[in-house]
Image (cartoon, rainbow, N blue to C red):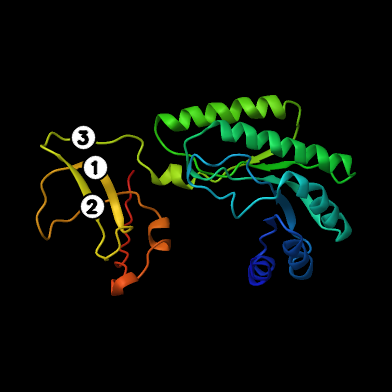
Amino acid sequence: MQSSVPYQVRRHVGDNLTTFDSKEELDKIKKWHPQCALLIRVKVPDDSRSRCPLGAKFGALPEEIVPLLQAAQVLRLTVTGVSFHIGSGAMQFRAYREAIAAAKIAFETSARLGMPKMHVLNIGGGFTAGSQFKEAASTVKAALRYYFPNEPGLIIMDEPVRFFAEKDHPTCKAARNYDSTVFGPTCDAIDTVMKGYRLPELNVDYWLVFPNMGAYRAAAGTSFNGFNTSDILTYLAYSN
């Protein structure tokens, strides 16, 4: 359960859109930011093929949608749409279609309860770069046409953070490589950076560069075994 502090900050800075998936969140929003527009976050039917599935923690189950929308009505909060996230680094693109279908049910449920018409659909992130993105985009486009064919004014939002951080294709150089495993400095075998990767022969003091790591690298770092995380060096590149 989140602290009430984020809602106080949102109200202060004028951030007027957030998600909820529990009655407790609604109570805090009512207390600290009642003017905020809300998206009900629904649980994705299947996020098992994602690198970082989020459904175990986030999202309302199908049987919870009606009670949550009714609770929002009682509290006189404004629910403007639906949000979902199929997990970061998703590889099963059918999950997008299933999630959009679940969102459509939530839209219809809201209308059946006599609530103001929903007009926002946040399809989350999880998009990978390269050829997989085209398949994911095609799946999303087809699902939107099927489930939301006549929704004038519908706002579609997404969060393509991983897509912007990843490379679109690998750069290959001729070199003799070997099947390799790279471990971190701790004593735990779980501290495996990568396994079964082709690398050239390495020596002590060589550096391995992992481009486009993004913010998740720092967020997941620990000081286990007394090894501190490395410093973050920020470079800004400009081009015309």
Tell me the tag on residue 197.
Answer: 1
Mark 2 touches mark 3? (CB < 8 Å): no
On screen, residue 143 above or below 119: above
The local secondary structure at tag 2 comes to: strand
The local secondary structure at tag 1 comes to: strand
Q: Could you tell me which residue is drawn at 25 percent across and 56 percent down?
A: 183
Decide if residue 80 is on the left or right side of residue 236. Answer: right
Mark 1 touches mark 2? (CB < 8 Å): yes
**Which quadrant of the figure contains the C terminus?**
top left
On screen, residue 14 above or below 130: below
Front of the two marks 2 and 3: 2
**Which quadrant of the figure contains the N terminus?**
bottom right
Decide if residue 103 is on the left or right side of residue 214. Answer: right
For the residue carrying disc 3, how many other residues have a C-alpha within 10 Å: few (<14), some (14-19), or many (20+)? few
**Mark 3, residue position:** 172
What's the residue type where badge 1 is placed? Tyr
- Is residue 154 visible in the rendered image? The answer is no
How far, Cα to Cα, is label 2 from label 3?
Answer: 20 Å
How far, Cα to Cα, is label 1 from label 3?
Answer: 14 Å
**Mark 2, residue position:** 182
Camera-side residue of 191 and 5 = 191
On screen, residue 35 above or below 164: below
Camera-side residue of 114 and 200 = 200
How far, Cα to Cα, is label 1 from label 2?
Answer: 8 Å
The local secondary structure at tag 3 comes to: loop
